[in-house]
Amino acid sequence: MARYAIGDVQGCYLSFLAMLEKIEFNVERDELWLCGDLVNRGPGSLEMLRWVWQHREQVRAVLGNHDLHLLAVACGQSKLRKGDTLSELLAADDAEQLLGYLHDLPLAYCQDGWLMTHAGMPPGWTVEQTLAESARTQRHWQQLGDQFFAEMYGNEPALWRDDLSDIDRSRYTINALTRMRFVDEHGRLDMKCKVAPGEQPPGLVPWYAHPAFDPDGVHIVFGHWASLMGRSTHPRVFALDTGCVWGQQLTALRLEDCERFSVSGLPPQC
C-alpha cells in the first residue's frame, strides 16, 4: 500500500487522471489524500467530484476555500463569481449526492504522523487543537445548516482567542485552515497578501516560519498557496499546490518516502 497526497486539483480532471497514471495508483491497494479545492476554475469539477465519490473508500480529503464556496452557493448563501466553473456541477442530476459528500468532509485530517489541511496550521496551535477545532467547526455548520454559510465569510477575527463566540471561532478556523498564507509578528492572519515569500510587506512571514509554529513531530501537507510552487523552508511542511489550474503543474507526494511526482497542468490538458 502507498499513500499519495495531491495538491489543488480545482477541476483539472484530465491532469488528475494523468497523475493517477503516472503514480500507477491502484484503487485496490493505495490511498489518496486530497488537500482541498477539488473543484472550481478548471473545466472538470463535476467529473472530479464524481471520481472522488466513486472511490471515496480510498480517498481522504479535506475542504478548501473553493469547496466551501461551492457549498455556500449551493444553499443560496453566496453567488457564483467571475471565473467560477461550477454551473454544470450545480445542475447535475447527482448534485445532491456530491454536495452531501463535500458537506461531510473535515477541515483537517491526521493519520500516522501526517496532518493534512488545505492552507496549513496556524502558529500557536497544536495538532490536537487543529483537529479539535476542525471537528467543532464541522459540528457547527451541521447544526446551523444554511445559515452557517451566510456567516462564515469575513477576515475577522484575525487572531485566535479562547473566548471567541461560536461563529467567530468557526470563522477563524476556516480562515486559518483554508485561506491562510502570511501572519504578522503576533500570529495575526493576513488575508490580503498572496505573493511568494520574499515579496511580502515588512512585518509579515509565512505561517510556517513564525516562531510560534510548532508541528511537534508531525509532518504537514497542504495546498492553497500556488506562488510557493511547492517550496517550503520548514523541513516538516510540504507545499503541494503548484498552480495546475494556472497552467503550471499538478503535484503529488508519496508519504512513505516523500518522493514528489508532477504532471502538466497546461490547457487544454487540465
Image (cartoon, rainbow, N blue to C red):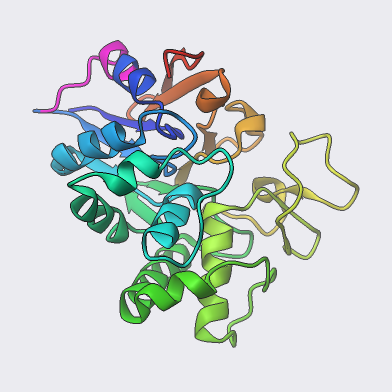
Is the N terminus in the top left, top right, bottom left or bottom right quadrant? top left
Q: Residue at x 83, y 42 (%)?
A: 200
Which quarter of the figure is the C terminus placed in? top left
Tell me: 150 left or right of 90.
right
The location of residue 109, given as percent across then percent down, is: 35, 53
**Residue 148's x, y, as percent?**
44, 75
Residue 258: tell me if it is visible. no
Front one among 117 and 266: 266
| Of residues 96 and 8, the one drawn nearer to the viewer in this rendering | 96
Is residue 165 depicted above or below 212 in this figure? below
Q: Decide: is 74 above or below 200.
A: below
| Residue in the picture at 40% in, 52% down | 63
Magenta span of residues: 19-27
Most foreground residue, 169 or 38: 38
Q: Quadrant of residue 10 in the image?
A: top left
Residue positioned most to the left: 28
- Give yes or no for residue 93 being in the magenta stretch: no
Answer with left or right where residue 225 lies relative to residue 107.
right
Residue drawn at the location 18% of the way across and 46% of the way down: 93
Specify the quadrant of the image occupied by residue 131. bottom left
**Up-down: is 172 above or below 180?**
below
User: Residue 257 appears at what percent x and percent y?
Assistant: 37, 24
Where does the image place residue 139, in percent across and percent down from the top left? 33, 75
At 45% from the left edge and 33% from the top edge, which residue is drawn?
Answer: 7
